[in-house]
Amino acid sequence: MSSLLRGKDFITTQDFTKEEIDLFIETAFDLKKKLARGEIHPLLAYKTLYMIFYDESTRTRNAAETGITQLGGHGIFLSPDKMQAHHGETPSDTAKVLTRFGDGIAIRHCQFGVGNKYLNDIAESAEIPVINLQDDKYHPTQILADLMTIEERFGKDLKHIKVGISWAYAESHLKPLSVPQSQILLFPRYGMDVTLAYPEGFDLMPEIVEQAKQNAEAGGGSLKITHDMDEAFVDADIVIPKSWGGFYTIDNPMEADKRKEEIMEKVREHKDWICDERRMSLAKKHSVYMHALPADRGREVVDSVIDGPHSIVWDEAENRLHTMKAIMALVMGGRP
Ligand code: CP
């Protein structure tokens, strides 16, 4: 394994070997301990991170902005409607300018069919690392936090840990596919056995599923797909029920609204896809409940589960900070 991660883009975990992912996780554990001890760790002193958010965020933005501060650098929040991108400045021109000023560009752009392409367009012209804060395909910073949280609970050897990833009913908004897609890609690389459950019509991207199967083959894990939510819970060590359905583009707002309503109608047919006490009782006694958050309480999950003894969502949310710091420290800093 090369320790030279400096300068690399962090767009998907697929771009990193398992050993490199382990280095991110070990660095995150190290930074978590340093923060707990009150040891200052200015690994990115005087460095600047630009954070472009096309979509809303609570955890990801604050993990990045708090994280860069704790590392001795500075984060600048950029809203696209206040940038010249709003008047048509190209991703390439934006990337070249930010390259001349600072040390990293972090982007959230979840629009279906657009976000991942935008990130790659920026990365092509930027000479500083580009970090994916969630696009339409991947949410790699979330998934590193998930892996760290799983290792905290189950240790380093995750072979044949059984993970149930399930679609769940939600009405707040049509959530991107990027969280379950990133989970099915990464977890089988660690030997985990993943059961993915969703109602007919809510398929993830076929190329991602194909890649996840190849990862399972190489990593000793497995990926099984079912349309029965209970099946994801039976005998599971970890359950991750979460909605998705952002299969629409917004080039034409009227068409987008029509498409969103069509999808919402299908979503409403599956109000029984909820994580409740009965379903939790199907999982192992020591099972844990995870969710990237925000959760639709009363729809995706009942309060007694998310606030109950199986839930580790607050550890998972906290680990967003430590893993984000590890990513920034290694790709924006690292070996001189
Ligand atoms: N899990 C997650 O990405 O949260 P935010 O949307 O609040 O950033």
Image (spheres, rainbow, N blue to C red):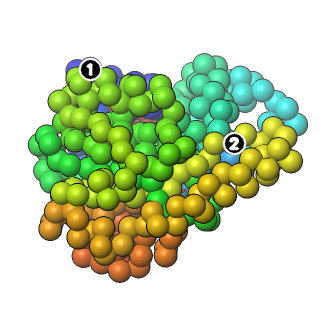
Q: Quadrant of residue 255?
A: top right
Looking at this view, is 314 or 101 the one in front? Answer: 314
The circle on residue 117 is none
The location of residue 181, given as percent across then percent down, is: 44, 39
Judge whether residue 131 can be spotted in this image.
no
The location of residue 295, given as percent across then percent down, is: 48, 66
Give the tally of numbered discs. 2
In the orientation shown, which residue stands out farthest toward the bottom? Answer: 304
Mark 2: amino acid: Tyr
The circle on residue 248 is 2
The location of residue 112, given as percent across then percent down, is: 65, 38
Judge whether residue 193 can be spotted in this image.
yes
Looking at this view, is 211 or 330 the one in front? Answer: 211
| Residue at left offset 16%, top offset 63% | 284
Task: Please tell me whether residue 174 is drawn above or below residue 111 in the rendered image.
Answer: below
The circle on residue 2 is 1
User: Dot 2 lies on which element?
Assistant: loop
Task: Please tell me whether residue 285 is drawn above or below residue 99 in the rendered image.
Answer: below
**Left or right, 14 with reference to 151:** right
User: Dot 1 lies on which element?
Assistant: loop
Q: Residues within 10 Å of mark 2 (few under 14, many from 20)?
A: some
Mark 1: amino acid: Ser
Q: Quadrant of residue 309?
A: bottom left
Dividing the image into 4 quarters, which one contains the C terminus?
top left
**Left or right, 218 with reference to 156:** right
Dividing the image into 4 quarters, which one contains the N terminus?
top left
| Residue at left offset 41%, top offset 39% | 182
Q: Of the residues tagged 1 and 2, which is closer to the observer?
A: 2
Circles 1 and 2, Cβ within 8 Å, touching? The answer is no
Looking at this view, is 117 or 88 the one in front? Answer: 117
Q: Earlier in the sequence, mark 1 or mark 2?
A: 1
| Residue at left offset 27%, top offset 43% | 194
